[in-house]
Amino acid sequence: MNATGAASIAVVGPGAIGTAIAAALHEAGRTPLLCGRTPRERLTLQDGDRRITVPGPVRVDPPKLGRTVDLVFLAVKATQIEAAADWLTALSGPTTVVCVLQNGVEQLEQIAPHARAAQIVPAVVWFPVQAQSDGSVRLRADMRLSLPDTSHARVAAEALQGTRCHVELSANFHGLAWRKLLQNAVAGLMVLTHRRSGMFVRSDISALALAYLRECLAVARAEGVELDDGVPQEILDKFQASPADMGTSILTDREAGRPLEWDTRNGVIARRGRALGVATPISDILVPLLAAASDGPG
């Protein structure tokens, strides 16, 4: 804690999600330290007609930081963990909480080797944001996070208390994380078609999406996750009700030629299925296509 008793906070990865979290904190008078790979003077979030500017600079040199913080919001993608490792080392002390704003259900395993001194808290991010051509970020729904109901998660929840970002502490966090994983997994179809949410109104795509979601649900249940039979249809309904131009982060990365989170969002379903003896015939086709789209060669 600093001299005023408020937690010192850093946001590592000032991309779309990181910008939204930084803006929520800044609005509430808790402007975080901004840490990334590219120097920037400020971050900008667009919410309808409103623009929220978070003052920088974005720091890019971890060894020069010289201090740890109480709370880190880690907002890099799974493909960027290695690049953020020096920031985790520089910012983390024995009482630091690292809240991982990242897709998938393997955040603890992925982050622990790079933040051994810290207490790691996984999160589920429920709000869509999109990077804009001018470098700003567009918020397309109310901000909401789900965290496990633990003492370390409460540090993150308290930091966001009174901000535009609603935080839910859940005793069934594992179930929520898997539900979001199903949503992220089926969004992989958007990469392979180069289309946005509007494609899900097609009867052939909706049938494929529903079959894939049911396959993912079978793996989740084999993991011991309690999700009811209606979840696949609910997720599909959400895509069909979204604006036709609504994208997803993995599609944005594909369009920009960046590495994809195919293993975190889709490969994990096939991997866990094999380990648990659950057949995943749709995953067995989709995952190699997504991996090749991400990593080549060719």
Image (cartoon, grey):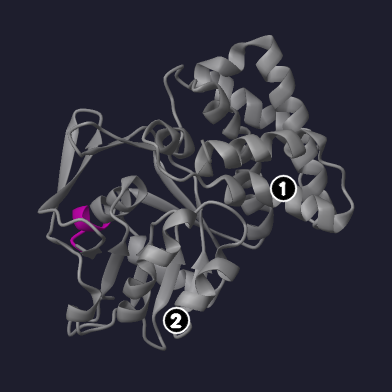
Q: Which residue is mark 1?
A: 269
Q: Position of residue 290 (x, y in %)?
A: 59, 37
Picture residue at 67% right of the left edge, 30% below the top: 234
**Can residue 22 be seen from the camera position used here?**
yes
The residue located at (54%, 36%) in the rendering is 293
Between 170 and 20, which is closer to the camera in this rendering?
Answer: 20
Residue that badge 2 annotates: 118
Report whether 292 appears left or right of 83: right
Quarter of the view holding residue 213: top right
* Residue furthest to the front: 298
Q: Which is nearer the eye, 54 or 283? A: 283
Quadrant of the frame with the N terminus:
bottom left
x and y, in percent, of residue 185 in the image: 62, 39
Q: Is residue 26 magenta?
A: yes
| Percent x, y of residue 252 | 40, 34
Other residues around mark 1 within 10 Å, as few (<14) / some (14–19) / many (≥20): many
Q: Find the magenta span and give its range.
A: 25-30
Q: Who's the residue at 86% across and 56% down the image?
A: 276
In the visual, does 78 lie left or right of 205? Answer: left
- Seen from this angle, which residue lies furthest bottom? 94
